Image: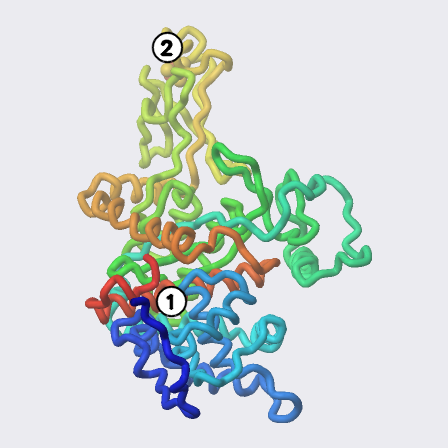
Amino acid sequence: MMGHQSDSQKPLFYSFNLEDHVPQSHLLRGIDRVLDLSELRQHLSQFYSHTGRPSIDPELMIRMLIVGYSFGIRSERRLCEEIHLNLAYRWFCHLGLEDPVPDHSSFSKNRHGRFRESDALRRLFETVLQRCMSENLVRGEGFAIDASVIKADANRTRGPSGEEVIDWKAPGRSTRAVREYLAALDEDGPPVTTPASISLTDPAARWTSAPGGPAFYAYCTNYLIDLKAGIIVDVEATPATRGAEIGATQTMIERVEQRFGLKPDRLVGDTAYGGAATLAWLVDEKHIKPHIPVLDKTEREDGTLGLSAFAYDGERNRYQCPMGKMLTTTGRVTKNKQILYRSSPRDCRDCPMKKKCCPNTRFRKIGRSIHEAARNVARAIAKTAAYARSRKERKKVEILFAHLKRILKLDRLRLRGPNGAQDEFLLAATAQNLRRMAKWLIPKLPKMVQAPG
Ligand code: SF4
């Protein structure tokens, strides 16, 4: 006989303790154990008036955001709904069963108001990093650097050409993202290269072409990670350009040193970071070993002799060509920070190797970077076993980006402008560190109650 659930015994009062209903092995329990917001709360108190209408408790805001970014809940509306319905989320946010959850519009308003002005998210990131350090998850010996392109919240089919003159004061156009863009233009001047297209909704996002797909507007999230446990020690949002990524490297290395006294012995990165100026900064100024492939354009692809065919004589500051002739210099430094060495047209005129060396010019010219010594340091490191290990360790930062996009679902931003990108990247990096710390310190979490990933 089919059973029938009776509804005649509904009690008038329930005794319900949320604590009893969140499994001990839930990921949020692990995160809660390692999250201490007391100092942050103290810092935030100065940004909130003691009179007037109470805002959303900043600690509640932070806990809600951590839930959102740890579990890939990208929409503010959905986050508020999920926290309303999910017992573990309520428990983590210190909300009782009957406590109201902020509605998404006041959540959004609070998030972009005083909360942003207070720099709470940078503080939160640093608080969590400090805890990772005190739990011995950061060694400080080796760091890795990398950047990942994240689509901006901007329609790729609607932007005018970057050459076009745009009236940013037109009605309806003065959004927060546009104001941030104009403020940056006032401070830094126009970009060095004109983008092919510019977004009217998020003009600071850069028009970027991805291999094999159509171009889109994007920012980059730049990660500096410690290689021991893959903890992110700094994060920076930049426009999706190579120059900005390089700039972020220096910003992050300096900031981590100033804030936490951490300076690695070696920095691991890909060829994008192997430019002469970056290598020189690492080797000469910071005394950090670059485990980075040298960005080398000295070999030629047309079959003519590359730089390796010429021997450098450091004592006499000249090159010797394969025919034993000298290439000398006046010592003048070019715009590209190179010193030019030239052979004598007389030597080359009847040389049997001319066709292989300088078929279209009267003499051979070689450019030597003023940072060649630093490039040579990187070249020497690239031959060591330690470098081969570093190449494998670099995968840790790639895994973090894959996790960011696939599990935390941050493959497209929801907030606009450089500050919106910075907020999202800081929160995602904080969530990744919290998840990693919780899993590292509480390793026996059964898969069932963990968030994906
Ligand atoms: S062409 Fe000139 S520089 Fe080149 S190998 Fe001959 S002599 Fe040397």
* Above or below, 238 relative to 50: above
Where is residue 32 shown, x and y percent of the image? 34, 77
**Residue under numbered circle 1:** 257
Where is residue 348 shown, x and y percent of the image? 43, 12
Q: Which residue does the image show at 38% across and 15% down from the upper left?
A: 303
Mark 2 closeness class: few <14, some 14–19, many ≥20 residues within 10 Å? some
**Depth check, front residue: 385 or 423:** 423
Q: Amino acid at mark 2?
A: Met
| Mark 1 C-beta closer than 8 Å to ligand 1 | no
- Furthest toward the front, the residue is 1
**Residue under numbered circle 2:** 353
Task: Determine whether the residue tagged by mark 1 lies in a helix, strand or loop.
Answer: helix
Q: Which residue does the image show at 67% across and 48% down from the upper left?
A: 199
Where is residue 274 shown, x and y percent of the image? 39, 43
| Mark 2 C-beta closer than 8 Å to ligand 1 | yes
User: Would you say residue 303 is visible in this rendering?
Assistant: yes
Say left or right for 238 vs 347. right
Q: Amino acid at mark 1?
A: Glu
- Quarter of the picture for ligand 1? top left
Residue 250, image quadrant: bottom left
Task: Determine whether the residue tagged by mark 2 lies in a helix, strand or loop.
Answer: loop
User: Would you say residue 122 is visible in this rendering?
Assistant: no
Where is residue 154 shown, x and y percent of the image? 62, 50
Q: Which residue does the image show at 48% across and 85% down from the upper left?
A: 98
Q: How many marks?
A: 2
* The C terminus lies in quadrant: bottom left
* The N terminus lies in quadrant: bottom left
* Above or below, 283 relative to 368: below
Say left or right for 112 vs 394. right
Q: Calculate the distance from the C-alpha at mark 2 to the C-alpha at mark 1.
A: 52 Å
